Image (spheres, helix red, strand yellow):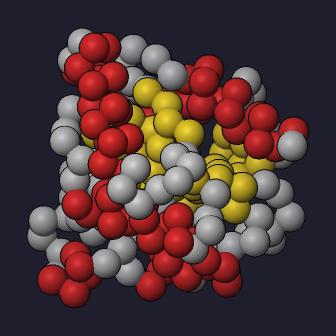
């Protein structure tokens, strides 16, 4: 249960982020995947994370404090069509430095649009996160946009694609910011990670 959620800071450098003295759960995904909507759905606050249609606007590491106990981190989306080629090619040093250095990072949630076939940029990113040994779970978003059967088929296809490179697949969850599907599952997952 999220009782309180408040913005703390925005940074471009992991070294300037709040003291790493609380467990931290970060959210990332391709732009427009529904990250802001999901964060707002999870926290029950309509405008906590800004849903933005402007490329490059949220190129910051945004910290929120939840229940005075853990940090929720909104990371920049990757894959904007309009950013420069070099920026587009990778998720950038800001995000990779944060992910590889932030010692209290308990889990990175990588968001995937449940309507799409596995996208190269997502697979590449996920593989890189796995190689770095960063704890990760996948969240398939916008489940309300299609039947649950189609969403399950999407997840199954994603699993088959990942099996080429992964022995133990990360946890996977299905959500909808519109209907609230998956809210309890994600929050319970966070609680379990914190309890362990
Ligand atoms: P972000 O760029 O990843 O933060 O994506 P946003 O949260 O801003 O969402 C991008 C677009 O998808 C917006 O038009 C949202 O209203 C829409 N959207 C996000 N999540 C959902 C969802 O679960 N269901 C539906 N139907 N639309 C969604």
The residue that appears at 49% across and 31% down in the rendered structure is: 173
List x then y, in percent, for residue 171.
Answer: 56, 39
Percent of width and height locating residue 99: 58, 71
Residue at (22%, 76%) from the top-left corner?
A: 88
x 66%, y 45%: residue: 6
The extreme left residue here reads 82
Residue 186 in the image: above or below residue 53: above
Task: State the image quarter where residue 9 is shown.
Answer: bottom right
Residue at x-position 53% and y-position 64%: 130
In percent of width and height, residue 31 lies at 28, 54
Location of residue 40 with respect to 119 vertically, above or below: above
Q: Nearer the viewer, residue 169 or 14?
A: 169
Question: Is residue 47 at all visible to an observer of this figure?
Answer: no
Res 23 visible:
yes
Front-most of 152 and 93?
Answer: 152
Quadrant containing the N terminus in the rendered view = top right
In the displayed structure image, the side of residue 154 where residue 179 appears, left or right: right
Q: Relative to residue 30, is residue 131 depicted above or below? A: below
Q: Is residue 29 left or right of residue 180?
A: left
């Amino acid at each position: 249960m999220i009782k309180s959620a408040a913005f703390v800071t925005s940074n471009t450098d992991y070294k300037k982020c709040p003291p790493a003295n609380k467990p931290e759960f970060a959210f990332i995904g391709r732009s427009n995947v529904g990250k802001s909507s999901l964060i707002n759905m999870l926290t029950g606050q309509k405008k906590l994370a800004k849903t933005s249609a402007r490329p490059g606007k949220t190129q910051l590491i945004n910290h929120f404090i939840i229940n005075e106990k853990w940090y929720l981190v909104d990371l920049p989306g990757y894959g904007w069509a309009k950013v420069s080629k070099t920026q587009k090619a990778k998720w950038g040093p800001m995000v990779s430095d944060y992910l590889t250095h932030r010692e209290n990072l308990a889990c990175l949630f990588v968001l995937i649009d449940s309507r799409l076939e596995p996208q190269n940029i997502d697979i590449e990113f996920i593989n890189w996160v796995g190689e770095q040994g960063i704890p990760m779970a996948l969240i398939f978003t916008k489940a309300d946009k299609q039947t649950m059967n189609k969403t399950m088929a999407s997840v199954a296809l994603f699993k088959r694609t990942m099996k080429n490179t992964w022995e133990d697949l990360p946890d996977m969850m299905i959500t909808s910011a519109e209907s609230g599907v998956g809210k309890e599952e994600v929050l319970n997952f966070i609680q379990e990670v914190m309890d362990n």
